[in-house]
Amino acid sequence: MSHPIQLHPSADFIARTRAATADKDLRKGFRGAMDFLQAKRAAQFPDPVELETLRDLGAAIRRHSLACLPDLLEQLEGRLTANGIQVHWAETPDEANAIVLDIVRRRQAKSVIKGKSMVSEEVAMNHVLEAAGLEVLESDMGEYIVQLAGEAPSHIIMPAIHKSKQQIAALFAAKLPGVAYTEDVDELIRIGRDVLRRKFAAADIGLSGVNFAVAETGTLFLVENEGNGRMCTTVPKVHVAITGIEKVVAKLEHVAVLNTLLPRSATGQAVETYQNFISGPRKPDELDGPEEVHLILLDNGRTQAYADREFRATLQCIRCGACMNHCPVYARIGGHAYGTTYPGPIGAIISPHLLGIGATHALATASTLCGACAEVCPVRIPIPQLLIRLRNEAQADSAHASALRGAGESHSVLGSLIFRAWALLYAHPAFYRMATWLMSRLRVLAPARQGAWTQMRTPLIPARRRLRDLLREPRRDAARDSTVA
Protein backbone atom coordinates (compact mmCIF):
# COMPACT_ATOMS: atom_id res chain seq x y z
CA MET A 1 0.00 0.00 0.00
CA SER A 2 2.60 2.52 -1.11
CA HIS A 3 1.90 6.21 -1.68
CA PRO A 4 4.14 7.54 -4.44
CA ILE A 5 4.02 11.28 -5.10
CA GLN A 6 0.79 11.88 -7.01
CA LEU A 7 2.16 14.19 -9.69
CA HIS A 8 1.28 13.86 -13.34
CA PRO A 9 2.42 15.99 -16.28
CA SER A 10 0.16 18.92 -17.10
CA ALA A 11 -0.27 17.42 -20.56
CA ASP A 12 -2.39 14.65 -19.01
CA PHE A 13 -4.66 17.05 -17.15
CA ILE A 14 -7.22 17.30 -19.96
CA ALA A 15 -7.42 13.52 -20.29
CA ARG A 16 -8.00 13.15 -16.55
CA THR A 17 -10.70 15.82 -16.49
CA ARG A 18 -12.49 14.17 -19.42
CA ALA A 19 -12.41 10.83 -17.66
CA ALA A 20 -13.81 12.43 -14.50
CA THR A 21 -16.61 14.29 -16.26
CA ALA A 22 -17.55 11.11 -18.13
CA ASP A 23 -17.99 9.25 -14.82
CA LYS A 24 -21.64 9.94 -13.99
CA ASP A 25 -21.47 8.27 -10.57
CA LEU A 26 -18.44 10.36 -9.59
CA ARG A 27 -20.09 13.60 -10.71
CA LYS A 28 -23.34 12.75 -8.93
CA GLY A 29 -21.48 11.88 -5.73
CA PHE A 30 -19.38 15.03 -5.73
CA ARG A 31 -22.32 17.28 -6.59
CA GLY A 32 -24.35 15.89 -3.70
CA ALA A 33 -21.42 16.11 -1.26
CA MET A 34 -20.56 19.69 -2.24
CA ASP A 35 -24.19 20.82 -1.96
CA PHE A 36 -24.37 19.23 1.51
CA LEU A 37 -21.15 20.89 2.70
CA GLN A 38 -22.17 24.29 1.32
CA ALA A 39 -25.49 24.11 3.17
CA LYS A 40 -23.79 23.09 6.43
CA ARG A 41 -21.29 25.96 6.20
CA ALA A 42 -24.06 28.48 5.47
CA ALA A 43 -25.99 27.25 8.53
CA GLN A 44 -22.94 27.92 10.75
CA PHE A 45 -22.74 31.57 9.65
CA PRO A 46 -26.31 32.89 9.88
CA ASP A 47 -25.10 36.39 10.74
CA PRO A 48 -23.28 37.92 7.74
CA VAL A 49 -21.84 40.72 9.86
CA GLU A 50 -20.28 38.24 12.29
CA LEU A 51 -18.91 36.20 9.37
CA GLU A 52 -17.22 39.15 7.70
CA THR A 53 -15.84 40.38 11.02
CA LEU A 54 -14.36 36.94 11.73
CA ARG A 55 -12.90 36.75 8.22
CA ASP A 56 -11.29 40.15 8.64
CA LEU A 57 -9.80 39.10 11.97
CA GLY A 58 -8.64 35.74 10.65
CA ALA A 59 -6.99 37.34 7.63
CA ALA A 60 -5.30 39.94 9.84
CA ILE A 61 -3.90 37.23 12.13
CA ARG A 62 -2.51 35.22 9.23
CA ARG A 63 -1.00 38.30 7.58
CA HIS A 64 0.60 39.32 10.85
CA SER A 65 2.02 35.82 11.30
CA LEU A 66 3.52 35.87 7.82
CA ALA A 67 4.88 39.40 8.20
CA CYS A 68 6.77 38.22 11.29
CA LEU A 69 7.44 34.69 10.04
CA PRO A 70 11.27 34.56 10.41
CA ASP A 71 11.14 35.91 13.97
CA LEU A 72 8.19 33.70 14.92
CA LEU A 73 9.95 30.59 13.63
CA GLU A 74 12.99 31.37 15.75
CA GLN A 75 10.79 32.02 18.77
CA LEU A 76 8.88 28.79 18.13
CA GLU A 77 12.08 26.75 17.95
CA GLY A 78 13.33 28.26 21.19
CA ARG A 79 10.10 27.61 23.09
CA LEU A 80 9.70 24.08 21.72
CA THR A 81 13.28 23.22 22.63
CA ALA A 82 12.77 24.58 26.14
CA ASN A 83 9.65 22.40 26.40
CA GLY A 84 11.62 19.29 25.44
CA ILE A 85 10.46 19.00 21.81
CA GLN A 86 13.19 18.32 19.26
CA VAL A 87 12.94 20.64 16.25
CA HIS A 88 14.17 19.70 12.77
CA TRP A 89 14.31 21.85 9.63
CA ALA A 90 13.78 20.37 6.15
CA GLU A 91 14.17 22.30 2.93
CA THR A 92 13.03 19.49 0.61
CA PRO A 93 10.84 16.36 0.80
CA ASP A 94 13.98 14.21 0.71
CA GLU A 95 15.36 15.99 3.78
CA ALA A 96 12.07 15.59 5.65
CA ASN A 97 11.94 11.88 4.91
CA ALA A 98 15.62 11.46 5.85
CA ILE A 99 14.90 13.00 9.27
CA VAL A 100 12.05 10.57 9.90
CA LEU A 101 14.15 7.62 8.74
CA ASP A 102 16.93 8.67 11.10
CA ILE A 103 14.48 8.72 14.04
CA VAL A 104 13.09 5.35 12.96
CA ARG A 105 16.53 3.74 12.78
CA ARG A 106 17.71 5.22 16.05
CA ARG A 107 14.63 3.86 17.81
CA GLN A 108 14.80 0.58 15.86
CA ALA A 109 11.15 1.05 15.00
CA LYS A 110 9.18 -1.46 12.97
CA SER A 111 5.80 0.23 12.65
CA VAL A 112 4.36 3.72 12.28
CA ILE A 113 0.74 4.74 12.84
CA LYS A 114 -0.33 8.04 11.36
CA GLY A 115 -2.90 10.66 12.12
CA LYS A 116 -4.11 12.84 9.27
CA SER A 117 -1.29 14.83 7.66
CA MET A 118 -1.42 16.36 4.18
CA VAL A 119 2.22 17.43 4.51
CA SER A 120 3.23 13.77 4.87
CA GLU A 121 1.30 13.14 1.64
CA GLU A 122 3.12 16.08 0.08
CA VAL A 123 6.51 14.44 0.71
CA ALA A 124 5.30 10.86 -0.05
CA MET A 125 6.36 9.74 3.43
CA ASN A 126 4.37 6.50 3.39
CA HIS A 127 6.12 5.36 0.24
CA VAL A 128 9.57 6.13 1.68
CA LEU A 129 8.90 4.41 5.03
CA GLU A 130 7.43 1.32 3.41
CA ALA A 131 10.40 1.11 1.06
CA ALA A 132 12.58 1.04 4.19
CA GLY A 133 10.68 -1.99 5.49
CA LEU A 134 8.30 -0.35 7.96
CA GLU A 135 4.62 -1.05 8.40
CA VAL A 136 2.76 2.24 7.95
CA LEU A 137 -0.92 2.52 8.76
CA GLU A 138 -3.22 5.51 8.33
CA SER A 139 -5.58 5.86 11.31
CA ASP A 140 -7.91 8.55 9.96
CA MET A 141 -10.86 6.62 8.53
CA GLY A 142 -10.84 8.44 5.21
CA GLU A 143 -7.06 8.09 4.87
CA TYR A 144 -7.31 4.41 5.84
CA ILE A 145 -9.85 3.82 3.06
CA VAL A 146 -7.73 5.43 0.36
CA GLN A 147 -4.63 3.64 1.67
CA LEU A 148 -6.43 0.30 1.32
CA ALA A 149 -7.42 1.32 -2.22
CA GLY A 150 -3.86 2.39 -3.09
CA GLU A 151 -5.06 5.90 -3.89
CA ALA A 152 -4.23 9.43 -2.84
CA PRO A 153 -6.73 11.64 -0.97
CA SER A 154 -9.15 13.49 -3.23
CA HIS A 155 -9.92 16.24 -0.69
CA ILE A 156 -7.74 17.78 2.02
CA ILE A 157 -10.40 17.36 4.72
CA MET A 158 -12.38 14.34 3.49
CA PRO A 159 -9.86 12.07 1.75
CA ALA A 160 -12.36 9.41 0.61
CA ILE A 161 -15.17 11.74 -0.43
CA HIS A 162 -14.99 10.32 -3.96
CA LYS A 163 -16.02 6.83 -2.81
CA SER A 164 -19.57 5.57 -2.32
CA LYS A 165 -20.56 3.27 0.53
CA GLN A 166 -20.90 0.45 -2.01
CA GLN A 167 -17.30 0.95 -3.14
CA ILE A 168 -16.06 1.04 0.47
CA ALA A 169 -18.04 -2.09 1.31
CA ALA A 170 -16.50 -3.94 -1.63
CA LEU A 171 -13.03 -2.66 -0.69
CA PHE A 172 -13.30 -3.85 2.92
CA ALA A 173 -14.63 -7.24 1.84
CA ALA A 174 -11.76 -7.67 -0.62
CA LYS A 175 -8.90 -6.34 1.52
CA LEU A 176 -9.77 -7.29 5.13
CA PRO A 177 -9.72 -10.99 6.02
CA GLY A 178 -12.97 -12.35 7.40
CA VAL A 179 -15.00 -9.24 6.64
CA ALA A 180 -18.32 -9.79 4.88
CA TYR A 181 -19.81 -7.33 2.41
CA THR A 182 -22.09 -4.82 4.11
CA GLU A 183 -23.38 -1.40 3.10
CA ASP A 184 -24.30 -0.43 6.64
CA VAL A 185 -22.25 2.73 7.27
CA ASP A 186 -22.06 2.27 11.04
CA GLU A 187 -20.87 -1.30 10.57
CA LEU A 188 -18.23 -0.21 8.05
CA ILE A 189 -16.89 2.35 10.51
CA ARG A 190 -16.85 -0.26 13.29
CA ILE A 191 -14.90 -2.68 11.07
CA GLY A 192 -12.31 -0.03 10.28
CA ARG A 193 -11.92 1.02 13.90
CA ASP A 194 -11.52 -2.56 15.09
CA VAL A 195 -8.55 -2.94 12.78
CA LEU A 196 -7.01 0.38 13.80
CA ARG A 197 -7.41 0.04 17.57
CA ARG A 198 -5.24 -3.05 17.63
CA LYS A 199 -2.44 -1.10 15.96
CA PHE A 200 -2.19 1.90 18.30
CA ALA A 201 -0.68 0.00 21.21
CA ALA A 202 1.73 -1.93 18.99
CA ALA A 203 3.08 1.01 16.94
CA ASP A 204 6.59 2.22 17.72
CA ILE A 205 6.10 5.72 16.31
CA GLY A 206 3.06 7.94 15.97
CA LEU A 207 3.08 10.56 13.21
CA SER A 208 0.77 13.55 12.85
CA GLY A 209 0.33 16.85 11.15
CA VAL A 210 -0.09 20.23 12.85
CA ASN A 211 -2.92 22.72 12.37
CA PHE A 212 -1.15 25.60 14.11
CA ALA A 213 2.15 25.97 15.98
CA VAL A 214 2.12 28.67 18.68
CA ALA A 215 5.40 30.60 18.97
CA GLU A 216 4.53 32.22 22.30
CA THR A 217 4.08 28.96 24.21
CA GLY A 218 5.77 26.34 22.03
CA THR A 219 2.48 24.46 21.54
CA LEU A 220 1.41 22.20 18.69
CA PHE A 221 -2.34 22.43 18.05
CA LEU A 222 -4.15 19.58 16.28
CA VAL A 223 -7.87 19.16 15.59
CA GLU A 224 -9.82 16.03 14.64
CA ASN A 225 -13.17 14.27 14.96
CA GLU A 226 -12.31 10.61 15.44
CA GLY A 227 -9.87 10.49 18.36
CA ASN A 228 -7.26 8.71 16.26
CA GLY A 229 -5.00 11.75 16.28
CA ARG A 230 -4.96 11.79 20.07
CA MET A 231 -4.10 8.09 20.10
CA CYS A 232 -1.26 8.59 17.60
CA THR A 233 0.25 11.38 19.66
CA THR A 234 -0.03 9.77 23.10
CA VAL A 235 0.18 5.97 22.88
CA PRO A 236 3.40 5.32 20.88
CA LYS A 237 6.68 6.08 22.65
CA VAL A 238 7.71 8.55 19.94
CA HIS A 239 5.57 11.27 18.37
CA VAL A 240 6.78 12.90 15.15
CA ALA A 241 4.83 15.92 13.87
CA ILE A 242 5.41 17.47 10.47
CA THR A 243 4.11 20.79 9.15
CA GLY A 244 4.86 23.58 6.73
CA ILE A 245 6.76 26.58 8.03
CA GLU A 246 3.75 28.85 7.40
CA LYS A 247 1.57 27.23 10.10
CA VAL A 248 3.13 29.24 12.94
CA VAL A 249 1.07 31.88 14.78
CA ALA A 250 2.27 34.37 17.36
CA LYS A 251 -0.11 33.86 20.30
CA LEU A 252 -2.37 31.18 21.72
CA GLU A 253 -5.31 33.59 21.52
CA HIS A 254 -4.85 33.68 17.74
CA VAL A 255 -5.63 29.96 17.63
CA ALA A 256 -9.02 30.62 19.21
CA VAL A 257 -10.04 32.93 16.35
CA LEU A 258 -8.69 30.72 13.58
CA ASN A 259 -10.27 27.65 15.07
CA THR A 260 -13.61 29.43 15.18
CA LEU A 261 -13.34 29.71 11.40
CA LEU A 262 -11.73 26.34 10.61
CA PRO A 263 -14.42 23.73 11.47
CA ARG A 264 -17.31 25.96 10.44
CA SER A 265 -15.72 26.57 7.04
CA ALA A 266 -14.50 22.99 6.54
CA THR A 267 -17.30 20.64 7.58
CA GLY A 268 -20.01 22.95 8.88
CA GLN A 269 -19.34 22.04 12.52
CA ALA A 270 -19.49 24.56 15.33
CA VAL A 271 -16.42 22.91 16.86
CA GLU A 272 -14.32 19.81 16.33
CA THR A 273 -14.78 16.73 18.52
CA TYR A 274 -11.15 16.75 19.69
CA GLN A 275 -8.67 19.57 20.17
CA ASN A 276 -5.12 18.58 21.09
CA PHE A 277 -2.57 20.95 22.62
CA ILE A 278 0.91 19.38 22.73
CA SER A 279 3.67 21.25 24.52
CA GLY A 280 6.22 18.55 25.25
CA PRO A 281 6.93 14.86 25.90
CA ARG A 282 5.62 12.98 28.91
CA LYS A 283 6.87 14.29 32.25
CA PRO A 284 8.02 11.94 35.05
CA ASP A 285 4.78 12.37 37.02
CA GLU A 286 2.47 11.84 34.01
CA LEU A 287 0.82 8.50 33.22
CA ASP A 288 0.66 8.74 29.45
CA GLY A 289 2.23 10.49 26.51
CA PRO A 290 5.30 9.87 24.34
CA GLU A 291 8.87 9.73 25.59
CA GLU A 292 10.04 11.84 22.65
CA VAL A 293 8.34 14.53 20.58
CA HIS A 294 9.82 15.77 17.31
CA LEU A 295 8.65 18.57 15.02
CA ILE A 296 9.73 18.78 11.37
CA LEU A 297 9.33 22.23 9.81
CA LEU A 298 9.17 21.87 6.03
CA ASP A 299 9.94 24.50 3.41
CA ASN A 300 9.47 22.73 0.03
CA GLY A 301 8.93 25.90 -2.00
CA ARG A 302 7.14 27.91 0.66
CA THR A 303 9.96 30.44 0.93
CA GLN A 304 9.57 31.04 -2.81
CA ALA A 305 5.96 32.04 -2.25
CA TYR A 306 6.95 34.03 0.83
CA ALA A 307 9.56 36.06 -1.08
CA ASP A 308 6.92 37.41 -3.49
CA ARG A 309 4.63 40.02 -1.90
CA GLU A 310 1.61 38.96 -3.94
CA PHE A 311 2.11 35.19 -3.70
CA ARG A 312 2.72 35.41 0.06
CA ALA A 313 -1.07 35.45 0.48
CA THR A 314 -1.06 31.79 -0.60
CA LEU A 315 0.54 30.91 2.74
CA GLN A 316 -2.39 32.37 4.70
CA CYS A 317 -4.33 29.14 4.05
CA ILE A 318 -5.60 27.25 7.11
CA ARG A 319 -6.48 24.14 5.03
CA CYS A 320 -10.24 24.20 5.58
CA GLY A 321 -11.14 23.12 2.04
CA ALA A 322 -14.01 25.61 1.73
CA CYS A 323 -12.68 26.78 -1.63
CA MET A 324 -12.96 23.22 -2.98
CA ASN A 325 -16.46 22.77 -1.59
CA HIS A 326 -17.68 25.84 -3.48
CA CYS A 327 -15.64 25.50 -6.69
CA PRO A 328 -17.76 24.56 -9.74
CA VAL A 329 -14.74 22.95 -11.41
CA TYR A 330 -13.70 20.80 -8.42
CA ALA A 331 -17.33 19.70 -7.96
CA ARG A 332 -17.33 18.25 -11.47
CA ILE A 333 -13.90 16.65 -11.73
CA GLY A 334 -12.96 15.79 -8.12
CA GLY A 335 -9.52 15.88 -6.56
CA HIS A 336 -7.68 13.13 -8.43
CA ALA A 337 -8.02 14.90 -11.79
CA TYR A 338 -5.67 17.63 -10.57
CA GLY A 339 -2.87 15.08 -10.13
CA THR A 340 -1.30 16.87 -7.16
CA THR A 341 -1.41 16.50 -3.37
CA TYR A 342 -3.49 19.66 -2.93
CA PRO A 343 -6.40 19.82 -5.42
CA GLY A 344 -8.97 22.49 -6.12
CA PRO A 345 -8.41 26.26 -6.02
CA ILE A 346 -5.89 26.20 -3.16
CA GLY A 347 -3.96 23.45 -4.93
CA ALA A 348 -3.86 25.47 -8.11
CA ILE A 349 -2.09 28.35 -6.35
CA ILE A 350 0.16 26.42 -3.96
CA SER A 351 1.30 23.52 -6.17
CA PRO A 352 3.32 25.76 -8.53
CA HIS A 353 5.52 26.73 -5.58
CA LEU A 354 5.94 23.14 -4.40
CA LEU A 355 6.46 21.54 -7.80
CA GLY A 356 7.26 24.35 -10.23
CA ILE A 357 5.05 26.26 -12.64
CA GLY A 358 6.14 24.15 -15.59
CA ALA A 359 4.70 20.97 -14.08
CA THR A 360 1.46 22.55 -12.85
CA HIS A 361 0.62 25.43 -15.19
CA ALA A 362 -2.57 23.73 -16.41
CA LEU A 363 -4.10 23.92 -12.92
CA ALA A 364 -4.31 27.72 -13.03
CA THR A 365 -6.47 27.47 -16.13
CA ALA A 366 -8.88 25.01 -14.45
CA SER A 367 -10.99 27.86 -13.15
CA THR A 368 -13.91 29.94 -14.32
CA LEU A 369 -12.58 32.87 -12.22
CA CYS A 370 -16.10 33.09 -10.79
CA GLY A 371 -14.65 34.14 -7.43
CA ALA A 372 -16.63 31.66 -5.30
CA CYS A 373 -13.40 30.48 -3.66
CA ALA A 374 -12.42 33.99 -2.59
CA GLU A 375 -15.93 34.71 -1.31
CA VAL A 376 -15.83 31.80 1.15
CA CYS A 377 -12.14 31.77 2.09
CA PRO A 378 -12.11 32.36 5.87
CA VAL A 379 -8.78 34.22 5.70
CA ARG A 380 -9.52 36.17 2.50
CA ILE A 381 -6.92 34.72 0.12
CA PRO A 382 -7.45 36.46 -3.27
CA ILE A 383 -7.37 33.18 -5.19
CA PRO A 384 -8.68 34.44 -8.58
CA GLN A 385 -6.09 37.24 -8.59
CA LEU A 386 -3.32 34.72 -7.88
CA LEU A 387 -4.60 32.37 -10.60
CA ILE A 388 -4.37 35.18 -13.15
CA ARG A 389 -0.85 35.98 -12.00
CA LEU A 390 0.17 32.31 -12.37
CA ARG A 391 -1.30 32.17 -15.86
CA ASN A 392 0.79 35.18 -16.80
CA GLU A 393 3.91 33.73 -15.18
CA ALA A 394 3.53 30.46 -17.07
CA GLN A 395 3.30 32.24 -20.43
CA ALA A 396 5.86 35.00 -19.79
CA ASP A 397 8.83 35.26 -22.13
CA SER A 398 12.36 35.18 -20.78
CA ALA A 399 12.55 38.97 -20.60
CA HIS A 400 9.51 39.23 -18.35
CA ALA A 401 9.55 35.94 -16.43
CA SER A 402 9.95 36.26 -12.67
CA ALA A 403 12.25 34.28 -10.39
CA LEU A 404 9.52 31.72 -9.68
CA ARG A 405 10.62 28.17 -10.45
CA GLY A 406 9.37 27.18 -13.90
CA ALA A 407 8.15 30.67 -14.87
CA GLY A 408 7.99 31.00 -18.64
CA GLU A 409 8.20 27.26 -19.31
CA SER A 410 4.84 27.35 -21.10
CA HIS A 411 5.76 30.34 -23.20
CA SER A 412 4.75 29.93 -26.85
CA VAL A 413 6.43 31.97 -29.55
CA LEU A 414 3.41 31.49 -31.82
CA GLY A 415 1.03 32.54 -29.07
CA SER A 416 3.16 35.60 -28.34
CA LEU A 417 3.13 36.59 -32.02
CA ILE A 418 -0.65 36.17 -32.21
CA PHE A 419 -1.22 38.44 -29.23
CA ARG A 420 1.22 41.04 -30.56
CA ALA A 421 -0.66 41.05 -33.86
CA TRP A 422 -3.93 41.37 -31.95
CA ALA A 423 -2.55 44.33 -29.99
CA LEU A 424 -1.34 45.93 -33.22
CA LEU A 425 -4.79 45.64 -34.80
CA TYR A 426 -6.52 47.23 -31.82
CA ALA A 427 -3.95 50.02 -31.61
CA HIS A 428 -4.37 51.10 -35.25
CA PRO A 429 -7.95 51.61 -36.52
CA ALA A 430 -6.94 51.34 -40.18
CA PHE A 431 -5.38 47.92 -39.66
CA TYR A 432 -8.40 46.83 -37.64
CA ARG A 433 -10.87 47.84 -40.40
CA MET A 434 -8.76 46.09 -43.03
CA ALA A 435 -8.45 42.89 -40.99
CA THR A 436 -12.18 42.66 -40.17
CA TRP A 437 -13.05 43.32 -43.83
CA LEU A 438 -10.80 40.44 -44.90
CA MET A 439 -12.06 38.08 -42.19
CA SER A 440 -15.71 38.65 -43.09
CA ARG A 441 -15.00 37.80 -46.74
CA LEU A 442 -12.59 34.93 -46.15
CA ARG A 443 -14.64 33.34 -43.35
CA VAL A 444 -14.85 30.02 -45.22
CA LEU A 445 -11.13 29.58 -44.58
CA ALA A 446 -11.56 29.57 -40.78
CA PRO A 447 -10.05 26.26 -39.50
CA ALA A 448 -12.31 23.70 -37.82
CA ARG A 449 -9.66 23.06 -35.18
CA GLN A 450 -8.47 26.09 -33.24
CA GLY A 451 -6.19 24.70 -30.55
CA ALA A 452 -7.41 24.65 -26.99
CA TRP A 453 -10.50 26.70 -27.89
CA THR A 454 -12.17 23.89 -29.87
CA GLN A 455 -11.36 21.22 -27.29
CA MET A 456 -14.52 22.30 -25.47
CA ARG A 457 -16.16 24.85 -27.83
CA THR A 458 -17.34 25.27 -31.39
CA PRO A 459 -14.91 26.99 -33.83
CA LEU A 460 -14.77 30.76 -34.04
CA ILE A 461 -16.02 31.82 -37.50
CA PRO A 462 -16.20 35.51 -38.47
CA ALA A 463 -19.66 36.90 -39.25
CA ARG A 464 -20.67 37.49 -42.88
CA ARG A 465 -21.06 41.18 -42.21
CA ARG A 466 -19.15 43.36 -39.77
CA LEU A 467 -20.91 45.32 -37.05
CA ARG A 468 -19.81 48.60 -38.61
CA ASP A 469 -21.49 47.52 -41.88
CA LEU A 470 -24.72 46.63 -40.09
CA LEU A 471 -24.75 49.98 -38.30
CA ARG A 472 -24.50 51.82 -41.61
CA GLU A 473 -27.60 50.15 -43.05
CA PRO A 474 -30.22 52.25 -41.19
CA ARG A 475 -28.55 55.41 -42.50
CA ARG A 476 -28.60 54.08 -46.04
CA ASP A 477 -32.25 53.06 -45.69
CA ALA A 478 -33.12 56.49 -44.29
CA ALA A 479 -31.30 58.23 -47.12
CA ARG A 480 -33.11 56.05 -49.72
CA ASP A 481 -36.50 56.75 -48.10
CA SER A 482 -35.75 60.49 -48.17
CA THR A 483 -34.88 60.36 -51.87
CA VAL A 484 -38.11 58.49 -52.69
CA ALA A 485 -40.16 61.03 -50.74
Image (tube, grey):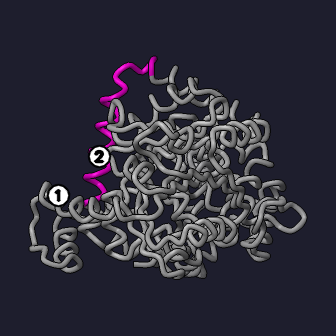
**Residue 147 or residue 378, whichever sits in front:** 147
Whole-percent x and y of residue 19? 38, 76
**Residue 144 or residue 369, whichever sits in front:** 144
User: Residue at the location (75% across, 60% down)?
Assistant: 393
* Range covered by the magenta-colored residues: 29-50
Q: Which callout, 2 or 1, points to the residue nearer the camera?
A: 1
Q: Is any part of residue 434 visible from this angle?
A: no
Label number found at residue 343: none
Q: Secondary structure at mark 1?
A: helix
Whole-percent x and y of residue 427? 82, 54
**Residue 416 or residue 266, whichever sits in front:** 266
Q: Quadrant of the N terminus?
A: bottom left
Whole-percent x and y of residue 20? 37, 71
Q: Quadrant of the C terminus?
A: top right
The residue that label 1 is drawn on is: 190
Dot 1, crowdedness within 10 Å: few (<14), some or many (≥20)? few
User: Residue at the location (57% across, 58% down)?
Assistant: 348
The residue that label 2 is drawn on is: 35
Quote the CA–CA distance across marks 2 and 1.
Answer: 27 Å
The overriding secondary structure of the stretch rendered in magenta is helix
Dividing the picture into quarters, in which one does residue 358 lie?
Answer: bottom right
Q: Is residue 33 magenta?
A: yes
Q: Is residue 276 magenta?
A: no
Q: Secondary structure at mark 2?
A: helix
In this picture, residue 437 sits left or right of residue 181: right
Whole-percent x and y of residue 51? 45, 24
At label 1, the amino acid type is Arg
